[in-house]
Image (spheres, helix red, strand yellow):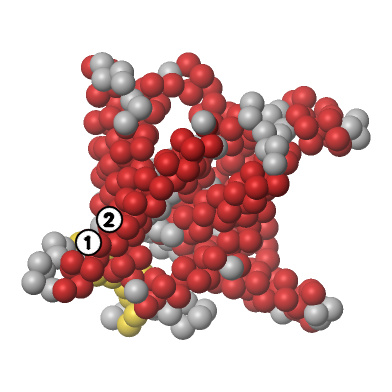
Amino acid sequence: MPYVRTFSDKVFLFIKGLAMGTANKVPGVSGGIVAFVAGFYEELIYSLQKFNRKAIMLLFKGRFKSLYQYVNGRFLLLVFAGSTVSYFSVSRVLDYFLRNFELFVWSTFFGMILGSIYYIAKDFKDWCRANIIAIIIGIGIGISISLMNPAKENDNLWFVFFCGIIGVSGMTLPGLSGSFILILLGNYVLLMVDSVNQLYKTIIDIFSWNFEFIHDEMRMRYMKIIASFTAGSVFGLVSTSHVIGFLLKRWHQIVTAVIIGFIGGSLGIVWPWKKEIYKTLDGQIILDSGGDKIIQNYSRYFPDVSDPKTWSAIGFIIFGIAILLALEWYGNKNKT
């Protein structure tokens, strides 16, 4: 298994973690795509697989150094440190751009996903009947998910735990957006906006030695929700990695074919030209804790070619494709 050797490797792996964490927060974009294209997807899966019976034995025996080496700790620490930091830094910047330049942000993501399909498919040589069927199945699943209607918000802790298992799937399944799944489950705003904002405030309070929040019933409710969601995410990461690792080892080409189809089918989720359908109650638009309108779904349309913004958006699609080509060039350069 490859491991980080130089300081620059560590820095770039941390940055890749930032990108993966940011992608996971955006509905329609999969952090797994970042891992796949950036070249550390299989290492991520096989490292997570190391959290098994042997790892538990090493933990209880107090052999922490052996445990750290066994689970490829340095790699996982850098990736997840980057992902965690992104939730309180890069993703907040991304939120700003989504508010003010939404069309161009979605266009860039659309281009990046187009580029990722090329990146994955260009080395796929086994176009047999089984793999073609697998691609079609992947496309069908991706399209079906994009057309589903969202459920209502549910803050039951067991359901939140389940959301953690499902939501983290975007890190292990390229093309499956964990954030979009949370929208379908009705809990995206609760878990990725409101709870994250409350956690951010709590961290600031702790570093300011202000512990009055423990008497705040609403804040503590959100902390329980975050804890349940985190526990579900950890369980989901480890369990799904074992399943995917098993599938990759035995049916690598078919799994890759499904991923190609799945990413292609999910393009509809990040289609740049769409209008928000807001969540309403008795005809009134519902707002989140920050006063923002809660998006329930999207209505997609074809762009007006006479609008200058359309051509600017197409330019950003090309820019998104160029980012993936640049990543490919960088990866090839490092191999030589």
Q: Residue at x 67, y 63 (%)?
A: 224
Taking depth in this image into account, of 336 and 324 the one nearest to the observer is 336
Residue 196: tell me if it is visible: no
Which element carries disc 2, helix, strand or loop? helix
Q: What amino acid is labelled 2 in the image?
A: Ile
Using the rendered view, name the quadrant where residue 308 is placed. Answer: bottom left
Q: Residue at x 51, y 19 (%)?
A: 249
Which element carries disc 1, helix, strand or loop? helix
> Does residue 326 appear to the left or right of 19 in the view shown?
left
Residue 226 image point, x, y percent: 64, 61
- Look at mark 2 in the image and give the residue it sits on: 318
> Does residue 63 appear to the left or right of 109 in the view shown?
right
Vertical placement of residue 295 versus 227, above or below: below
Residue 210: tell me if it is visible: yes
Residue 258 image point, x, y percent: 34, 30
- The residue carrying pointer 1 sits among few (fewer than 14), some (14 to 19) or many (20 or more) residues within 10 Å by Cα, namely some
Vertical placement of residue 193 versus 284, above or below: above
- Look at mark 1 in the image and give the residue it sits on: 314
Question: Does the CB distance between marks 1 and 2 fall below 8 Å?
Answer: yes
